[in-house]
Structure formats: C-alpha cells, structure tokens
C-alpha cells in the first residue's frame, strides 16, 4: 500500500473521486503545510494558518498504478491557478503535492511534466516535503457520500465526477 498526500482545492472534490477509485483503500481529508498545530476547518478556511486542504489517498499500486492516481489528480483540478480553484480562493486551496520520500518527489515531478502537456499555462503545483498531517473533522470525511444533494456537491463536485468517469472509467467502481 502507498499513500499520497495531495491538495487540489477543496478536499471534498478529490475525496469524492478517489473514494470511487479501484484499489483505493482509504481517503482521509485533512490539513497540512501550515504553521498552526491541530487546526480546525474554520481556522484553515480563514487563510491564516498556512495549511492546505488535502487528501491522504492510500491505494494498492498492484491494482491502480501510481501514475493513474497522479494523472487523475491533475485532471480533477486546475493546477495552473495559484491559490485558487474556481470560487475557492486562498492559500488553503493551493495545488500541492506533499512527499515523504525522494522516490515520491520524483514521481510527483514526473506527473507534473506529463500534465504540463495538457495545459497551455504553466503548472504552479508545489511539491514539498510532508510536514504534520492533521485529520479534518468527521463531517468532512467522505463528504460527498454523506451529502450528495448539497449545493456544492451538485454544482462543483458532480462535474468533476463526470470528468473522472469520462477519462478514468476503467479505474472507477461506480
């Protein structure tokens, strides 16, 4: 099993797709990259903690290749906008990849190179060592499954799920 910690805007969006990905055993929404210990959602949303909203995606690389997890990441958000994903604005929504080994850092950099071919603007995704990871509150775990009819889920997450189904249907469970 392998775990990647990725930030691509609101963690609910990444969580919704990775929860439906074959070979993924867990997706944990959380916060990392900032200077406040044990932050909560409202502190992170204030933009003052330095933390990014992220997901820790644990998967079996014999079922789903690392490259698929990473390529999906770049398909699910706009990695060319600094500190912004759609209407979500602030450093907490930055495109980010947090590595724990040199091998992961190289994989992340290679994924950026592959993704750059698909974007006309430069990718601004940060690739940095993983500091402390703080698990988000229970309400944020598997959010889409809990609240599929909530407005954000309907307007923001559903199109991302549709895009994932279009390009990655072979890797999705439903």
Image (spheres, rainbow, N blue to C red):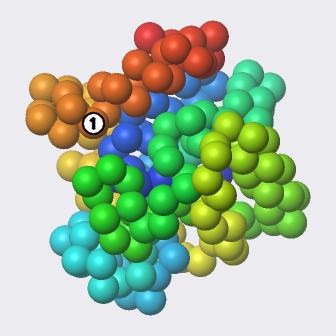
Q: In which quarter of the image is the N terminus?
A: top right
Hey, which quadrant is residue 12 in on the image? top left
Residue lying at 77% horizontally and 30% vertically, measured from the top left: 65
Q: In which quarter of the image is the C terminus?
A: top left
Counting the numbered discs, the total is: 1
Residue lying at 30% horizontally and 78% vertically, measured from the top left: 47
Hey, which quadrant is residue 102 in on the image? bottom right
Residue 150 percent location from the top left of the image: 12, 34
Residue lying at 79% horizontally and 57% vertically, measured from the top left: 109
Question: Does residue 107 appear in the picture of this structure?
Answer: no
Instruction: Sort mark 1 into few (<14), some (14-19) or many (20+) by Cα contacts within 10 Å.
Output: some
Quickly name the residue at label 1: 156
Closer-to-camera residue (161/42) = 161
Q: In this view, does 129 lie to the left or right of 13?
A: right
Q: Is residue 2 left or right of residue 125?
A: right
Residue lying at 13% horizontally and 26% vertically, measured from the top left: 149
Farthest residue toward the front? 120
Q: Is residue 30 left or right of residue 64?
A: left
Secondary structure found at label 1: helix
Residue 89 percent location from the top left of the image: 31, 65
Question: Does residue 14 appear in the picture of this structure?
Answer: yes
Residue 97 percent location from the top left of the image: 63, 60
Closer-to-camera residue (144/38) = 144
Measured along the vertical axis of the image, is residue 46 above or below residue 18? below
Residue 155 percent location from the top left of the image: 21, 32
């Amino acid at each position: 099993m392998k775990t990647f910690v990725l930030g691509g805007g609101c963690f609910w969006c990444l969580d919704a797709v990775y929860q439906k990905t074959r070979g993924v055993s867990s997706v944990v929404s959380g916060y990392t990259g900032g200077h406040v210990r044990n932050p909560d959602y409202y502190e992170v949303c204030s933009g003052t903690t330095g933390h990014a909203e992220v997901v820790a995606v644990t998967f079996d690389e014999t079922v789903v290749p690392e490259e698929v997890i990473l390529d999906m990441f770049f398909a699910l958000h706009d990695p060319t906008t600094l500190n912004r994903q759609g209407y979500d604005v602030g450093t907490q929504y930055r495109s980010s990849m947090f590595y724990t080994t040199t091998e992961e850092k190289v994989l992340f950099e290679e994924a950026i190179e592959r993704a750059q071919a698909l974007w006309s603007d430069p990718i601004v995704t940060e690739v940095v060592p993983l500091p402390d990871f703080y698990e988000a509150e229970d309400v944020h775990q598997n959010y889409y499954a809990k609240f599929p009819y909530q407005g954000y889920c309907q307007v923001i997450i559903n199109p991302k799920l549709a895009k994932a189904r279009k390009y990655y249907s072979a890797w999705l469970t439903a």
